[in-house]
Image (cartoon, rainbow, N blue to C red):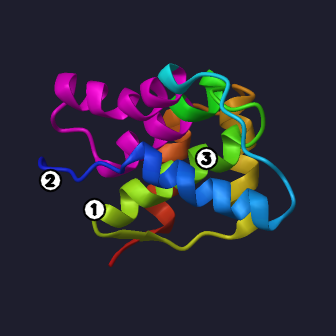
């Protein structure tokens, strides 16, 4: 697969804003530039690695968003949404246990697991839609 569909960062941000407000929290952006850079990490990688799998690109997107801290709160949620939307837009549904998803995400952010480990997790639990 070489022609990927890329998610709209502002659309995902609006969705997260609605989710947070429904829970009584307020979404606050620390750096819109860092937000865009996080989403763009996968697209940039794809330019240099045109054969990268969607799982690898989703893992890079997750890491890029989660570690740039573009939001005051909600970076991990935004990262997960970005990765899931990217996979979904490209015909892949992730069917993974919630706790295992949380654990791998936290391990990648904590640098005890790599983005390669996350890509492998996505591939094991990904299903063609």
| Magenta extent | 34-63
Q: Is residue 126 left or right of residue 48?
A: right
Q: Residue at x 57, y 60 (%)?
A: 15
Residue annotated with mark 3: 78
Q: Is residue 120 above or below residue 68?
A: below
CA distance separating discs 1 and 3: 18 Å
Q: Which residue is mark 1?
A: 90
Which secondary structure, mark 2?
loop
**Mark closer to the chain start, 3 or 2:** 2
Q: Is residue 49 magenta?
A: yes
Label 1 sits on a secondary structure element that is loop
If the image is split into quadrants, where does the C terminus sit? bottom left
Q: Extreme bottom residue here?
A: 129
- Marks 1/2 in contact by CB < 8 Å: the verdict is yes
Q: Disc 1 vs disc 2: which is toward the camera? A: 1
Classed neighbour count for the residue bearing mark 1: other residues with Cα under 10 Å, few (<14), some (14–19), many (≥20): some
Main SS of the magenta part reads helix
Residue farthest left in this picture: 2
> In the rendering, at what x and y percent does residue 106 appear?
75, 41
Q: Which mark is residue 1?
A: 2
């Amino acid at each position: 697969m070489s022609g990927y569909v890329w998610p709209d960062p502002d659309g995902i941000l609006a969705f997260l804003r609605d989710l947070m407000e429904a829970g009584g929290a307020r979404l606050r952006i620390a750096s819109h530039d860092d937000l865009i850079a996080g989403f763009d990490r996968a697209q940039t990688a794809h330019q240099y690695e045109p054969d990268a799998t969607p799982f690898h690109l989703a893992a890079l997107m997750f890491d890029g968003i989660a570690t740039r801290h573009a939001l005051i709160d909600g970076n991990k949620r935004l990262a997960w949404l970005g990765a899931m939307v990217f996979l979904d837009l490209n015909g892949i549904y992730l069917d993974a246990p919630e706790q295992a998803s949380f654990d791998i995400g936290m391990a990648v952010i904590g640098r005890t697991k790599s983005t390669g480990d996350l890509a492998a997790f996505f591939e094991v639990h990904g299903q063609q839609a």
